[in-house]
Amino acid sequence: MLNEIKNIFIKNFFNLSLNQILNVLFTLIITPILFKTLGSDQFGLINLYLTIVLLLSFIIGYGYNLNSPQRLASFHTKYQVQTLLVEILSVRIIISIIILFFSISITPLLNLSINQFYIFTFSLIILLSEAINPFFYYQGKDDLHGVALSNFIFKLFYFIFIVSFVKLKSDAYLVNLFFGFSALIVYTVCWTYIFRKENLTWYWINFKIFIDRIKENIFFTLSSLASYISVSSSLIILSFFVNNNELGNYSLAQKIGFLLRMIPVFITQSVLQIASRKNNNDKKSLEIFLNKTYNIGLIFSLFISLIIVFFSNWIIYYMSGEYIDYSQKILIILSLIPFFSMLNFKNMIIILVKEMKEVLYITTWNCVLFLFIIGSFLSYLYGGVGLSISLILTEIFNYFVCQFFIKKNESKYA
């Protein structure tokens, strides 16, 4: 059993690491192309609207990435798997269509320029692709090589579209369109293969089941939304205080910073299923396992942060074709986020394996509130540098607020 757990952890960590390496390589390849072709102002805008649409997509995900993998891991019959998959996908698709039409209907009220209107509306295809993102299935089946493979094919399609059709600044509206379209194609093929392999049947759920599923995951949904806001809303906050050129230079460094922030996330995803099993069988073993992983994660994230700090000047030069002191400063600060985020690793595992929905909801929205207050204040005073510092302060705040609410509610979830 011990060897099996180790093998699962190594396999999951390897596949998630491979997936993250693919993301890094893709970012290092595609970002210089887009930045040089579109310029800092258009580059900032496409990333701003990508952030907004991905924010909406977290509503569409409806928190099922948090609790459905554990359920899939415990299912033993085809009927259970089929019911869960069909109901989750149906709920996500219906929500995505509602949000899509709502977003299109309010665009006349947003006072957007023609350029911004095109970028925003063509970005909305991402909502449909996120509705059928199969990540939760692969995680629940401990089959994370499927994540890496689908991500590689998706990014390959995206890269081909970009180099083939994005030639001028006026082509900026195509960037997010190709992102969503590529994902939509790959995810559709993935689900077709999954349903045939598992011999599952698709059907549309009725209204009662839809409402039941909506009620079921409301806390996880709001928590997922808050988590994304606290991690990725920096561009939205900064856009109120700086011009498009500075927004683009900040976005250049943030591209790397966002990938680094995912290090603690994929460490958590690698051990979540193992931690769930240990929580049911041997809580002392769970504590030992988490402590070991925690210490390794802290050392690893600090090591990566120091490497990025050392090479920050060359990274920015490679990404933009020039030395941009502002972007380098931002990258140096953001490179420290994985280490501070890793501090909260054990708290997040405990919250997820015990399905502490209310605790997750309270802590994540407290962090969002903290970020918006401190982030807006420091952005007003110091621009992107102030905002970057506020992101680190939010990670530290998140650690302490999670500690407090877990201890406050531990008897309820014992």
Image (cartoon, rainbow, N blue to C red):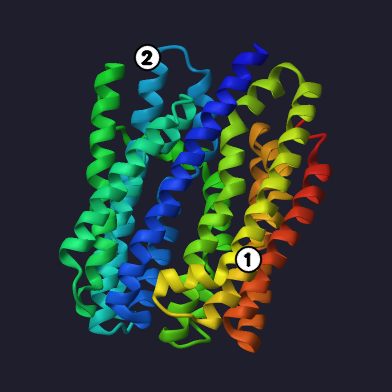
Q: Is residue 307 left or right of residue 144?
A: right
Residue drawn at x 58%, y 55% as measured from the top left: 261
Q: Earlier in the sequence, mark 2 or mark 1?
A: 2
Q: Using the image, tell me which numbered label, if any, was put on residue 78.
A: 2
Residue drawn at x 33%, y 62% as measured from the top left: 30
Residue 309 location in percent, x, y?
Answer: 63, 66
Label 2 Cα neighbours within 10 Å, binned few <14 / some 14-19 / many ≥20: few
The type of residue carrying mark 1 is Val
Quick one: quadrant of the C terminus? top right
Q: Say if 234 sits above or below 17 in the image.
A: below
Residue drawn at x 67%, y 72% as measured from the top left: 390
How many numbered discs, if any?
2
Quick one: quadrant of the N terminus? top right
Q: Say if 340 sits above or below 274 in the image.
A: below
Q: Using the image, tell me which numbered label, if any, was put on residue 309.
A: 1
Camera sees residue 376: no
Q: Is residue 260 left or right of residue 411?
A: left
Q: Nearer the viewer, residue 4 or 83?
A: 4
Q: Which marked residue is nearer to the observer: mark 2 or mark 1?
A: 1
Q: Nearer the viewer, residue 127 or 260?
A: 260
